[in-house]
Image: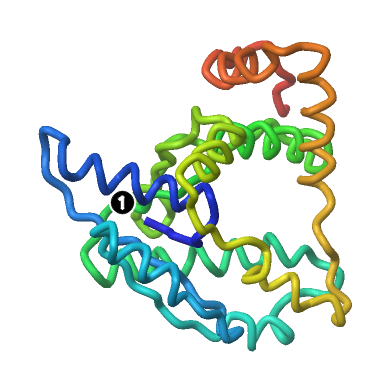
Amino acid sequence: MGLSGGKDSLALAHLLNRMQKHAPFSFELKAVTLSYGMGEDYTNLSKHCKEHGIDHEVIDSNIYEISGDTIRKNSSFCSYFSRMRRGALYTYALENGFNKLAIAHHLDDAAESFFMNFIHNGALRTLAPIYTSKRGVVVIRPLIFVRERQLIDNAVSNSLQVIGNEFCPGMKLSERNVKFPHARQEAKELLASMEKENPKLFTSLKSAFENIHKDSFFKAV
């Protein structure tokens, strides 16, 4: 599984670790943290995993170093680093005999992605709970039905020492001509406004993602 050390992935690490001990089937679990090569210090995260019996490894990369040459001008650094991170995790999984990669996306992420694609890309697309990548790795999102506020409450109530934006590559890119992300924040604010008017909004969205009427949409000719 991918472990950034944020509230979402840390919750998933504990969930899968507990599930591994009590599930009626056996599976191997490895929490993997990708270093972008910015001098990140994951000592506390590694210590936390060791204390709770979570098998953890930090893998190094030079993604930050090469980003200046490979990221396109005015492109979103978030999408760039997300693609690079996924590629590194796919490689790790394939080289180490893992057939599944668990990612800690939640229902708010799925809703925001839907509106981002709808508004900016002209596509009806969101985050699948499970899919197979082109490289043959099965990606699963065990937290896809969980609300972000529940994960925040979990981090607070369990006093989890989470990693915030300080390890985000974007925080070091302010001096470059790189486009900072705004679409996700706008989608988050839009959804918050809509949920105030309709408290059952996310319940409806979850149902809608499972109840797609393809024949009601325009078809390419």
Q: Position of residue 152 (x, y in %)?
A: 58, 40
Q: Residue at x 80, y 57 (%)?
A: 181
For the N terminus, give its image quadrant.
bottom left
- Name the amino acid, label 1: Lys
Quarter of the image that includes the C terminus: top right
Residue 91 image-quadrant placement: bottom left
Name the residue located 75 percent from the left edge and 78 percent from the top edge.
172
Left/right placement of residue 127 relative to residue 169 reads left
Would you call the spot at circle 1 few (<14 residues within 10 Å), some (14-19), or many (20 or more)? some
Q: How is the image coloured?
A: rainbow
- In the figure, 34 relative to 149: above or below? below
Give how far across and how far down residue 125 sits, in percent. 64, 35
Report x, y in % for residue 56: 31, 67
217 vs 107, left or right, is right
Residue 163 against residue 212 in the figure, above or below: below
| Vertical position of residue 80 compared to residue 8: above or below | below
- Camera-side residue of 168 and 204: 168
User: Which of these two is toward me, 156 or 190?
Assistant: 156
User: Nearest the camera: 97 or 176?
Assistant: 176
| Residue wearing tag 1 | 100
Q: Classify 165 as above or below 109.
A: below
On screen, residue 181 versus residue 83, left or right, reads right
Local SS, label 1:
strand
Q: Residue at x 81, y 18 (%)?
A: 196
Q: Residue at x 63, y 82 (%)?
A: 64
Q: Quadrant of residue 53?
A: bottom left
